[in-house]
Image: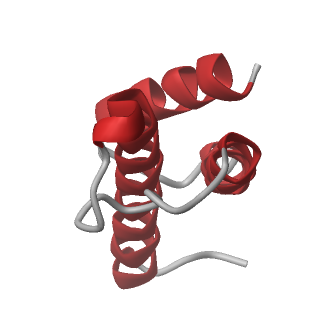
Amino acid sequence: MTRTAEEIAQAHKACLDGADTINVVIATHAKGSDATNADFGHDMTHDEKKERVARSVSYLKHQKTLTDWGSESFTVIDKAIADADAFTG
């Protein structure tokens, strides 16, 4: 199946959203007891944070296997994948 340019753009946006989720959960974890209600995932255990990050990175890794991305940038996504692997490893 060939994706349209619009479908590719939507999928890339979803990847960026996934990268943001990874970054936010890791940042909240890094705050430790200084995390507040305003921090996404503040009420999650460490294992729950790892599970959330693992789900998001799995999606990103799957999307990266697709070969029709054209000129979409994966710099932010690649960094999120590396950070997620380090966090969950």
Residue 46 occupies quadrant? top right
Residue at the far left in the pictured view: 38
Question: In front here: 8 or 54?
Answer: 54
Colour mapping: secondary structure
Residue drawn at point x = 33 percent, y = 33 percent: 31
Residue 57 occupies quadrant? top right
Is residue 61 shown to the viewer in this render?
A: yes
Is residue 74 shown to the viewer in this render?
A: no
Residue 6 located left or right of residue 1: left
Residue drawn at point x = 32 percent, y = 29 percent: 75
Looking at the picture, how far across and down is residue 29, in whole percent?
Answer: 46, 37
Total numbered badges shown on the rendered structure: 0
Residue at the far front in the pictured view: 33
Looking at the picture, how far across and down is residue 89, in whole percent?
Answer: 76, 19
Looking at the picture, how far across and down is residue 33, in whole percent?
Answer: 38, 38
Where's the N terminus, which quadrant? Answer: bottom right
Residue 66 located left or right of residue 33: right
Residue drawn at point x = 47 percent, y = 46 percent: 22
Question: In front here: 65 or 47?
Answer: 47
Question: In front here: 31 or 86?
Answer: 31
Looking at the picture, how far across and down is residue 25, in whole percent?
Answer: 45, 47
Residue 21 located left or right of residue 72: right
